[in-house]
Amino acid sequence: AAADFAEREAEALQDFLRSSLLPSAAEVCSELDRAEGLVPRLQILAARWQSLTAQRAEHRRIAELIDAREALETDLRQFDAEASDPTRFKRRGYSGVQESKRRADYQRHLRMLDASLTASAGEWAQREGLSFCIGGAEYRGAEILPSEHTHMYAWTNKQLAQKQASKSFSCEFQPPARGSTPASARGAGPGLAGRSRAQREADGPPPLRRASTGTLPKSVSEASSRSSLADASRRPSAAKRAPLAGPAPGHPARRLSA
């Protein structure tokens, strides 16, 4: 019976070491491995029994707090998935007041668990000189998802997929900026937009484009009329521009009758 007890305690201590990574537990395991015979092993366990029992009990208590927090996270995730369903308003017996109260209860419970975990983990680190570890790793669940960020649970897998799809679509389709050349005009083609600068210079200036109706716009016609009138007013009259013609040589001048 004593040999079985020593064997069970040695195995339990190995499991505790793998989870907590405590140096004191590693030291006891090393002593048990070096001990020869049952009596030396029982003496080692008896000398460290009180401290080992206290350490394992405290580690188990904090681990239970962590399990409770993870279970509450699961409940919160399920609750927020239901609360984000727009069809819930049409369900019989739905109450927005009860939903808000339930959310407040979840968050209050989560804050209480986080406060207990923070205090217990701090005392553990101060007493043992090592951060609290579980499963062979330091516990950081309260830091990764604090209680004030529980609204993150509202994003279900379906909503995340839809959001990612909308991001991909917005990256693939972007309207051209104002003043930029459309993609169809940038491609090769007979127009000016598809030709290089050297080709456009070799072609010379483009011909003036006439209106499809064959008539000038009203504003252009009025401007042309005003320009013609101004030029006519600046030109000298025919009487001022040339002297009066005299009689031809060899012909007497005719007298005009009164």
Image (cartoon, grey):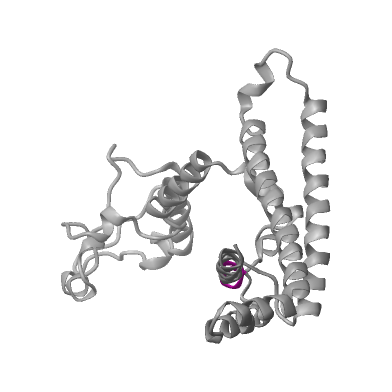
The spot of residue 169 in percent (x, y) is 41, 48
Q: Which residues are magenta?
A: 15-19
In the figure, is residue 104 to the left or right of 92? right
Q: Nearer the viewer, residue 102 or 115?
A: 115
Q: Nearer the viewer, residue 217 or 77?
A: 77
In the figure, is residue 176 to the left or right of 198? right
| Image quarter in which the N terminus is found | bottom right
Measured along the vertical axis of the image, is residue 37 above or below residue 257?
below
Q: Residue, x 81% and y 52% (percent of image)?
A: 111
The spot of residue 22 in percent (x, y) is 65, 78
In the figure, is residue 208 to the left or right of 112? left
Quadrant of the rendered image containing residue 154:
top right
Q: Residue, x 58% and y 81% (percent of image)?
A: 32
The spot of residue 228 in percent (x, y) is 42, 55
Q: Is residue 253 visible?
A: yes
Measured along the vertical axis of the image, is residue 111 above or below residue 33?
above
Q: Is residue 258 visible?
A: no
Measured along the vertical axis of the image, is residue 178 above or below residue 106?
below
Q: Residue, x 82% and y 59% (percent of image)?
A: 116
The spot of residue 184 in percent (x, y) is 26, 53
Quadrant of the rendered image containing residue 93:
top right
In the figure, is residue 228 to the left or right of 46? left
